[in-house]
Amino acid sequence: MNARAHRDSILLEDAEILDHQAFPGDQYLLRVQAPGCAARTRPGQFVHLQVHPLRPLRRPISIMRASAEAGWVDLLYKAVGEGTALLAERRVGERLSLLGPVGRPFEVKQERPLLIGGGVGMPPMICLAESLRNTTARPFVILGSEVPFPFEPRPSQILLPGLPDGVIATMPLLEDWDIPCRLASLQGYPGCHEGYVTDLARHWLRALDDEARAEVGLYACGPHPMLEAVVALAREFELPVQVSLEEFMACAVGGCAGCVVEVTTDAGSAMQRVCVDGPVFDGYQVF
């Protein structure tokens, strides 16, 4: 893929709210009609959304699902500040100015991609998993949350060797796609692994033989400490890893340079913009 091809995908659309659901923990699932964005979306990209007509500063929100045929885009977000609290008040039928899809997407090159999402970092993993449904890849998805999951977990019917006893909770949507998934939390939720997502991933990796483990690549999105732990896990098993970063940003098109992070390149240390140089980076370059 051309290193800058994703920069030509961005459109500005007047998106109509089709559905807006609230979940415990101030989590919301927003579906908007945005056919241009839906047709161009690739896993790991995000939208820059106007939360209210009186708030000109947009908010970056990861894309969870997109239907090119129906023209809708699903966005899962958490109301954590004034802007997203205003967004949570928007109703079906209202319109939002949407800029997207933005950013460098994930590029899956392994036969056994291990997808790890934490909190509001879950949506890119769901988007990536859906993109792999009709390929030869065999993904395994681990999702973690310290508030109730924004879906009703159910026991999985897909068997996975090497996992701790009783770890059976899955996301129904992924189960329906026949994609194995397990959940992790420190909150004692039934069927979930009592620990970190990386602990559960380590159980699975250790259960693989050398040949199978060589086919694994890690893909992750979530809080900074979680991503750091995922990259450490990749180092432990000598596996490739891609991470999607979450940063505050103003313009989301590379002009303001307000979302820069330091990365290590072949030429040395460099500052790159999360919005257009990312949000997906090689994990070893960031951590």
Image (spheres, helix red, strand yellow):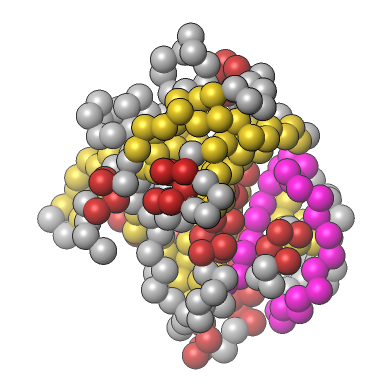
- Quarter holding residue 99: top left
Residue 121: percent from left, percent from top: 56, 46
Q: Mark yes or no: residue 139 visible.
A: yes
Tell me, yes or no, whether the highlighted magenta stretch contains residue 235. no
Instruction: Count the numbered circles shown.
Output: 0
Residue situated in front as seen by the camera: 211 or 287: 211
Instruction: Report the side of 142 relative to 59 (left or right).
Output: right
Instruction: Report the side of 36 relative to 10 (left or right).
Output: right
Quarter occupied by the N terminus? bottom left
Residue 250: percent from left, percent from top: 35, 24
Instruction: Report the side of 168 relative to 92 (left or right).
Output: right
Q: Main secondary structure of the magenta part?
A: loop
128 is higher (above) or lower (below) than 133: above
- Magenta region: which residues? 139-162
- Quarter holding residue 89: top right
Extreme-left residue of the structure: 267
99 is higher (above) or lower (below) than 214: above
Extreme-front residue of the structure: 69
Residue 104: percent from left, percent from top: 34, 51
Which residue is pictured at 62% across the width and 44% down the height?
A: 119
Q: Mark yes or no: residue 244 visible.
A: no
Which residue is pictured at 69% across the width and 46% down the height?
A: 145
Residue situated in front as seen by the camera: 248 or 84: 84
Residue 88: percent from left, percent from top: 65, 24
Instruction: Report the side of 62 relative to 268 (left or right).
Output: right
Tell me, yes or no, whether the highlighted magenta stretch contains residue 146. yes
Residue situated in front as seen by the camera: 250 or 267: 250
Residue situated in front as seen by the camera: 162 or 134: 134
Which residue is pictured at 76% across the width and 79% down the height?
A: 159
Which residue is pictured at 22% across the width and 29% down the height?
A: 255
